[in-house]
Amino acid sequence: MRFENLVFLSHPVTPDSGIMAKINLNNGKEVSVICGEGFYSSSRKGNRSSCTSVEDAASFEVMIDDEVLGWQSRDQITKLMKEYGKK
């Protein structure tokens, strides 16, 4: 699984200012990747600012199980999914 395989939709809590992708890894761990207003992410508008498309996102907040990691790059997310997919 790679970042490029994620499908982003409007975030259900902040549909006008955030995006989200969610996936279950082969081992059952759930990964949530979000960007938008109030999240630990950045967009063209700045840190923790509105983001309505993946192209506008500079970094993302990632949650794997109950662990939250802020300001993750696309490459870091791919590495995280590979790492956590093995655990």
Image (spheres, rainbow, N blue to C red):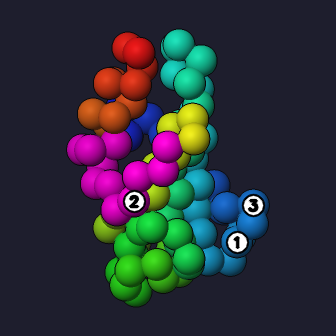
Query: Residue at coordinates 70% horizontally, 71% vertically from top-left?
Result: 14
Q: Quadrant of the C terminus?
A: top left
Query: Residue at coordinates 46% horizontally, 78% vertically from top-left?
Result: 48
Mark 1 neighbour density, 10 Å: few (under 14) some (14–19) many (20 or more): some
Q: Residue at label 3?
A: 12
- Residue 70 numbered mark, or none: 2
Residue 36 in sight here: yes
Query: Residue at coordinates 67% horizontally, 61% vertically from top-left?
Result: 11
Question: Which amino acid is tagged 1?
Answer: Thr
Magenta-drawn stretch contains 69: yes
Question: Which amino acid is tagged 2?
Answer: Gly
Q: Is residue 56 above or below residue 26?
A: below
Question: Which amino acid is tagged 3?
Answer: Pro
Mark 2 neighbour density, 10 Å: few (under 14) some (14–19) many (20 or more): some
Locate residue 80, reporting x and y percent: 34, 35
- Mark 1 against mark 2, which lies toward the viewer? 2
Q: For the magenta stretch, what is the residue range?
A: 67-77
- In this rendering, would 84 be left or right of 36? left
Q: Residue at label 1?
A: 14
Disc 1 element: loop
Q: First in sequence: mark 3 or mark 2?
A: 3
Mark 3 neighbour density, 10 Å: few (under 14) some (14–19) many (20 or more): few
Are discs 1 and 2 less than 8 Å apart at CB?
no
Residue 55 in sight here: no
